[in-house]
Image (cartoon, rainbow, N blue to C red):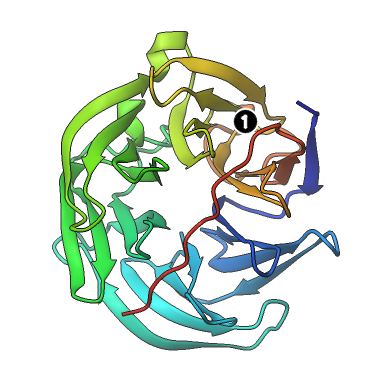
């Protein structure tokens, strides 16, 4: 593998949710506390940000068949955003759903679409001061959003995070960060049902510090996992649950990953800086990185099939 490259120096307070748009060759992401959606254009080597005043924004996913519409989160609300990347003009067309009504201090966190374009998005409560990645209460939920509504798929979650699916769509991968594991479920693509939860990989297996965060799955069905407060990305064999390799990231607060580029052979890595222990912060925390020529292909992400 080639060395990791800093392509967006300190562009985030807390970068998250990278989503590569293959059709437009653009990388979308968010800056959670900065309440901004971001767009990186590799052809111009430029990052543009749109600040949307209000609550934190933790996810952005393009809407199927629309060049300028996205589903985003704002606090506990999922909304439709109309925006042309690079422009300062935007419109919140409408709100789709508000979640976790009984937990007003919660907020939405990571989200991703399955092969049918249904959005899976989970929540989290306020983190314990001085312990980023830990909440201390099982009061969050994982939801699935489709044309029929917003469905509860998993309760008793502490901090909902990375999501992904196997190439045959028979397995779903999920991270509840404080558990320090990647869990697998049997997945029914037609119904969206998840069953048979089990631990696929635990950070303790290889004495990895930090907590698991965002993930993506490559064309060989291996998992690439960002480790928050661990400064690295792990490559995990989804069949054996064994660690294949580690990629060290110059930023300690590694948050998420996404394959991109024309042939989906570049791995983008988001990071944060205004989080965690100040003693652990380095000069490049909060940057966007890319690992070129990973020698494996990613799977094209799925856009949201708007209800």
Q: Residues within 10 Å of mark 1 (few under 14, many from 20)?
A: many
Q: Which residue bears the numbered disc 1?
A: 252
Residue lying at 71% horizontally and 55% vertically, measured from the top left: 11
Q: How many numbered marks have been drawn onto this rendered protein structure?
A: 1
Residue 114 location, quadrant: bottom left
Above or below, 208 against 145 in this view is: above
Residue lying at 45% horizontally and 70% vertically, measured from the top left: 72
Q: Secondary structure at mark 1?
A: loop
Near-viewer residue (130 or 181): 181
Check the picture and name the quadrant holding the C terminus. bottom left
| Residue 243 pos. (x, y %) | 49, 16
Judge left or right: residue 197 versus residue 127.
left
Near-viewer residue (279 or 18): 18
Residue 266 location, quadrant: top right
| Residue 290 pos. (x, y %) | 73, 42
Above or below, 229 against 298 in this view is: above
Near-viewer residue (105 or 215): 215
Residue lying at 21% horizontally and 68% vertically, measured from the top left: 150
Check the picture and name the quadrant holding the N terminus. top right
Judge left or right: residue 190 versus residue 202.
left
| Residue 174 pos. (x, y %) | 33, 39
Judge left or right: residue 258 versus residue 96.
right
Question: Residue lying furthest right in this view?
Answer: 44
Judge left or right: residue 162 versus residue 49.
left
Above or below, 119 against 148 in this view is: above
| Residue 277 pos. (x, y %) | 54, 32
Question: Residue lying furthest front in this view?
Answer: 168
Residue lying at 46% horizontally and 22% vertically, measured from the top left: 237
């Amino acid at each position: 593998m080639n060395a990791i490259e800093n392509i967006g120096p300190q562009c985030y307070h807390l970068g998250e949710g990278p989503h590569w748009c293959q059709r437009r060759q653009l990388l979308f992401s968010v800056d959670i506390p900065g309440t901004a959606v971001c767009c990186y254009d590799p052809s111009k080597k430029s990052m543009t940000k749109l600040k949307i005043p209000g609550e934190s924004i933790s996810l952005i996913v393009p809407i199927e068949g629309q060049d300028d519409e996205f589903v985003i989160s704002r606090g506990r609300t999922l909304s439709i955003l109309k925006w042309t990347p690079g422009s300062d003009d935007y419109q919140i067309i409408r709100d789709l759903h508000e979640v976790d009504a009984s937990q007003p201090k919660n907020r939405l966190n990571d989200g991703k679409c399955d092969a049918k374009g249904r959005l899976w998005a989970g929540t989290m409560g306020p983190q314990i001061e001085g312990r980023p990645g830990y909440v201390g209460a099982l009061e969050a939920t994982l939801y699935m959003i489709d044309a029929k509504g917003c469905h509860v798929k998993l309760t008793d979650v502490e901090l909902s995070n990375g999501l992904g699916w196997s190439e045959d769509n028979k397995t779903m991968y999920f991270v509840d960060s404080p558990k320090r594991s990647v869990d697998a479920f049997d997945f029914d693509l037609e119904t969206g049902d998840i069953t048979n939860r089990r631990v696929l990989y635990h950070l303790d297996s290889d004495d990895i510090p930090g907590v698991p965060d965002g993930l993506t799955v490559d064309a060989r069905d291996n998992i690439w996992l960002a480790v928050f407060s661990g400064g690295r990305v792990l490559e995990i064999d989804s069949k054996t649950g064994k660690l294949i390799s580690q990629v060290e990231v110059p930023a300690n607060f590694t948050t998420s990953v996404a394959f991109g580029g024309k042939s989906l052979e570049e791995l983008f890595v988001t990071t944060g800086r205004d989080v965690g222990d100040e003693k652990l912060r380095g000069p490049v925390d909060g940057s966007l990185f890319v690992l070129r020529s990973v020698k494996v292909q990613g799977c094209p992400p799925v856009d949201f099939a708007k209800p």
